[in-house]
């Protein structure tokens, strides 16, 4: 196993999360003093990019810190997290015994599995009950593939993490003395709920809910989806109340969400040098059902520099041309795509250039769709509706949970947990969501992190 879930050292860690729409990385060092906050020295993003050696190397140029070791939280579909009864065997027999136990629980030969074991520490508090353990398993070729990617990028992948332990690490920072911390993160495909106590993971549940990203889902369908999620969360709390009574859950923490907990109206910035087209964009876009806030810009000084200067007010969607007077649209897009303070902003190109000419001029960053002129407003509207669904449905779910769950819900401010003095843009809540799991995975130096 590639150092996964290994015991930690006092060194800092650089973590890269590639499970979302691009790569997001951070380098985190231990606090200067006991009781201080972990220090986030660097962060960077490659929105829309796939995990490959070239992208890794490019991101490393932005976030590498001397002495920091590299780790990666796996995407959810790349591993399985199981809870099984702890075998009553000697330590050196544990792995083989666990392999016998999980052989019928995974859908590939157990001999092809890399496994890691993490105890659920109930023995001292529930001595008359059989102890359980977490078993993380992933195919050996999956682990080897990630190791090879880092090696090709001239990086050494020292450890592999999973999303449950990354979330647990952040919850451990937020725990109050004697408190069980419920931490909830809402993503595009569902809700991840963990409960920690004294820095240890005792419970996890992922509630998949694809309606959260369905732009065609009506209000009643979304409400039913919210009800299903709340039911699962309440059942989780009831389970803790019945079976782990020493854990007291007084609040649930809500992880940062894109655009913050109360997003403003959907906003669009159009960069186009043709005055008539700018006017047409405003006329068409302002009449869309989501009633977006539309801004237009005519050139790089009016567009890109404004974006960088106003990173705290970045639009939800940038629509840009490639060929404009006095402006290199290709350079603008590449620069914007690499600006970490603009991570999470969707970009669409609308251009009169054909595909061959775009490739000849260097192409556009991965993940940016290119639409032809004349402007295909129906396609743009479909893209905007998808983005609105992802953003607003998640916000609706967060509000529904806060209103219907039986314990108070508080929005987690990572600025209260981390020292962002070297990375002040990341201190803003609206910029934190894409980096959440990378930050958690980088906390491998924590004393209680498994």
Image (cartoon, rainbow, N blue to C red):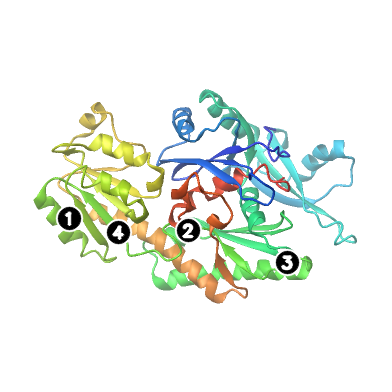
Look at the image and tell me whether residue 106 can be seen.
yes
Give the distance between the C-alpha atoms of the residues marked 2 and 4, in whole angstroms.
17 Å
Between discs 3 and 2, the one toward the N terminus? 3
Q: Secondary structure at mark 4?
A: strand
Which mark is first along the chain, 1 or 2? 2
Q: Label 4, on which residue?
A: 267
Tell me how far mark 2 sits from mark 1, CA to CA.
29 Å
Cα separation, mark 1 vs mark 3, equals 53 Å
Q: Which mark is nearer the camera, 3 or 2?
A: 2
Comparing labels 4 and 3, the label whose residue is closer to the camera: 4
Please say if the residues under marks 2 and 1 sit with CB atoms less than 8 Å apart. no
Say which element carries label 3: helix
Q: Which mark is residue 240?
A: 3
Tell me: 129 left or right of 61: right
Mark 4 / mark 3, whichever is N-terminal: 3
Residue placed under numbered mark 1 in the picture: 281
């Amino acid at each position: 196993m590639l150092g996964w879930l290994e015991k930690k050292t006092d060194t800092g860690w650089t973590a890269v999360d590639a499970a979302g729409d691009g790569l997001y990385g951070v380098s985190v060092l231990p606090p200067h003093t006991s009781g201080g906050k972990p220090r986030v020295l660097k962060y960077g993003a490659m929105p829309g990019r796939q995990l490959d050696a070239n992208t890794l190397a490019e991101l490393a140029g932005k976030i590498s810190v001397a002495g920091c070791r590299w780790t990666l939280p796996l995407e959810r579909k790349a591993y399985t997290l199981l809870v099984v009864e702890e075998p009553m065997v000697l330590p050196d027999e544990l792995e083989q015994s666990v392999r016998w136990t999980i052989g019928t629980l995974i859908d590939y030969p157990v001999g092809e599995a890399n496994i890691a074991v993490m105890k659920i520490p109930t023995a001292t508090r529930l001595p008359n009950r059989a102890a359980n353990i977490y078993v993380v398993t992933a195919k050996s070729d999956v682990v080897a593939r990630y190791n090879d990617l880092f090696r090709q990028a001239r990086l050494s992948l020292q450890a592999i993490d999973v999303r449950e332990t990354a979330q647990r690490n952040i919850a451990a920072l937020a725990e109050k003395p004697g408190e069980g911390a419920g931490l909830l993160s809402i993503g595009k495909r569902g809700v991840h709920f963990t409960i920690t106590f004294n820095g240890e993971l005792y419970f996890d549940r992922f509630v998949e809910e694809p309606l959260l990203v369905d732009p065609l889902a009506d209000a009643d369908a979304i409400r039913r989806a919210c009800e299903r999620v709340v039911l699962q969360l309440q059942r989780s709390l009831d389970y803790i109340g019945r079976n782990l009574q020493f854990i007291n859950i007084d609040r649930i923490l809500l992880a940062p969400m894109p655009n913050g907990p109360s997003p403003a109206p959907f906003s669009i910035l159009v960069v186009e040098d043709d005055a008539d087209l700018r006017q047409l964009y405003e006329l068409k876009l302002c009449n869309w059902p989501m009633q977006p806030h539309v801004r237009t810009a005519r050139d790089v000084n009016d567009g890109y520099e404004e974006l960088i200067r106003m990173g705290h007010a970045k639009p939800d969607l940038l629509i840009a041309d490639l060929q404009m007077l006095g402006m290199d649209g290709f350079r603008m897009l590449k620069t914007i795509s690499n600006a970490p303070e603009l991570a999470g902003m969707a970009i669409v190109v609308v251009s009169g250039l054909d595909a061959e000419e775009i490739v000849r001029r260097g192409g556009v960053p991965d993940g940016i769709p290119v639409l032809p002129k004349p402007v295909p407003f129906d396609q743009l509207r479909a893209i905007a509706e998808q983005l609105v669904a992802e953003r607003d449905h998640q916000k609706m779910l967060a509000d529904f949970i806060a209103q219907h769950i039986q314990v108070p819900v508080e929005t987690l401010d990572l600025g209260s947990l981390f020292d962002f003095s070297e990375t002040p843009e990341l201190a803003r809540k609206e910029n934190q969501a894409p980096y959440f799991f990378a930050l958690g995975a980088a906390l491998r130096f924590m004393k209680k992190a498994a």
